[in-house]
Image: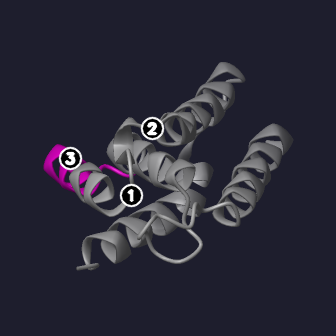
Amino acid sequence: MRTIIALSFAAAAAWSVAALAAPPASRLPQGTGLDDAGMAAWYAGNLCQASTSTVQSYRTKVDALSPGGSGTPDFHEGERQALSIVNQIRAEGGDTSELSQRVCPRSLSLIERTMALP
């Protein structure tokens, strides 16, 4: 249980640090980097039960708002980081429901805010 809590805090900390490093050329929501976008896409599609079409539309929007978009190393690093956190929890026999409660509202909110941009 302590590991799950520690990993949840690590995910939140990584998300916060990454948010401060958003590239200036990006038109993503303020404070959002491509790695944040990648984490949100992975969590939404794999942990938060967002539809495939929602995640694909989000990726397309990220592509339109930021140079390189979902094809950049930063975006893929965000996806890898989310996958790594979930795999570590599962490898230790943990339940991802606590992580879901922490990251799903944030991920889905980021997707909604991004999709609302012109």
Rounded to the nearest angstrom, the CA distance separating label 2 from label 3 is 16 Å
Identify the image quadrant of residue 81: top right
Instruction: Name the spot of residue 61 as percent of width and height, x first.
Output: 25, 59
> Which amino acid type is shown beneath numbered disc 1?
Ser
Which-is-in-front pick, marks 1 and 3?
1
Task: Residue under label 2, please give it.
Answer: 72
Task: Residue under label 3, please give it.
Answer: 56
Task: Residue under label 1, please give it.
Answer: 66
The answer to whether mark 1 and mark 3 are in CB contact below 8 A is: no
Q: Earlier in the sequence, mark 1 or mark 2?
A: 1
Which residue shows up at 36% across the image and 43% down it?
70
Check disc 1: other Cα within 10 Å, few if <14, some if 14-19, many if 20+: some
Check disc 2: other Cα within 10 Å, few if <14, some if 14-19, many if 20+: some
Q: Earlier in the sequence, mark 1 or mark 3?
A: 3
Q: Is residue 113 left or right of residue 57?
A: right
Q: Is residue 50 visible?
A: no
